[in-house]
Image (tube, rainbow, N blue to C red):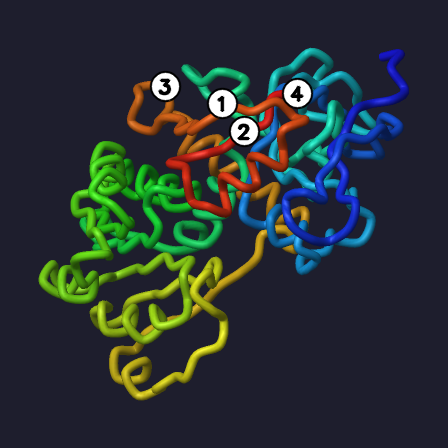
Amino acid sequence: MTQTEMTVIEMREPGGPEVLETGTRPVPEPREGEVLIKVTAAGINGPDLVQRRGHYPPPEGASDLLGLEVSGEVVGIGSGQSPWKLGDRVCALTNGGGYAEYVAVDARHCLPIPDGVSEQDAAGLPETFFTVWSNVFHSHAVPAGSNFLVHGGAGGIGSTAIQIGAALGLNVLTTAGSDEDCAFCRDIGAATAINFQIADFVEVTRAAGGADIVLDIIGGDYFARNIKACRHDARIIQLAFNGGSKVEVNLMPIMLKRLSYTGSTLRTRPDTFKAEIAGELTSQVWPFFADGTIRTLTHTVLPLADAAEGHRMMEAARHRGKILLSV
């Protein structure tokens, strides 16, 4: 490894996609317990957009560059024991720094590239799979046949949740904004896809017996509607609030239905927690790729220099699945 400088995408200042520009940084040195990855591709995710706007600062000690997931080759190993060796091909969850030619990552947060998945497409797996698994399935018994309502099924989080849920035998219902998006959701495993422009997801879900689990990225008026859609002892998981974070709450139905309401952000979780999730994904989810039960859903791949266009595309919701940057 002789290269000392690398191309990166930097934020000139908080703002719109136009603040993203190409820059140069020193290649990072992997610290104890880390590996250095030569990046093949990086995924664009919702938190990247929030950080770009100035509202999601990186954790202390993390890179200020955007990019929470990558795929590539291990080209450096920090001190201490490592489960990886030079030349290994991996995908990885990062605390930042993915929009670059090289990134240093906690070795425990790397996963092997699943059988049947290209190295480029693997870049779109870690962020959404870590997020969905840690919130919905980790430390929870989720019986087969449970009704799983997923909002925003055509996006990255939604499409991941649909596929994992269907693979594990859940009855997946999802919402999407067009008939075409609904068809996409059914194709990847949703039993019921609801075009929210013309149908009420509350009525459809209650007709199916009510939701056991709701995964929501909307917030706003969906808060009360999700409660109505739930059956007793259900769990509602909030991962974003594209429709607003402030709502007026009637606590009575939460109490009467014995509902659990939770939410989280992944980036600030302890490294040991993320390592545990990486192990569970490798053993319990990655095998589904080999037989095609779960597949990668790459919408488009753009050059790293076109990161701003990728952000515009994501903000306009002009995508199904993941938007990747090729390094």
Q: Are marks 3 and 1 in contact (CB under 8 Å)?
A: no
**Residue occupying the point 79% across, 45% down:** 12
Left or right of 315, for residue 204: left
For marks 3 and 1 on the same chain, the one whose residue lies earlier in the sequence: 1
Q: Residue 133, can we see it?
A: no
**Residue occupying the point 25% across, 78% down:** 257
Taking depth in this image into account, of 279 and 54 the one nearest to the observer is: 54
Q: Are marks 4 and 1 in contact (CB under 8 Å)?
A: no
**Mark 3 highlights which residue?**
290
Report the Cα–Cα distance between label 4 and label 1: 13 Å
Taking depth in this image into account, of 123 and 29 the one nearest to the observer is: 123
Q: What is the secondary structure assignment of the residue under circle 3? A: helix
**Mark 1 highlights which residue?**
121
Q: Position of residue 253 (x, y in %)?
A: 28, 83
Residue closest to the far front: 18
Disc 3 versus disc 2: nearer the observer = 2
Report the Cα–Cα distance between label 3 and label 2: 22 Å
How many residues crowd mark 2 within 10 Å: few (<14), some (14–19), many (20+)? many
Question: What is the number of the mark on residue 327?
Answer: 4
Q: Position of residue 118 (x, y in %)?
A: 48, 16
Question: What is the number of the mark on residue 324?
Answer: 2
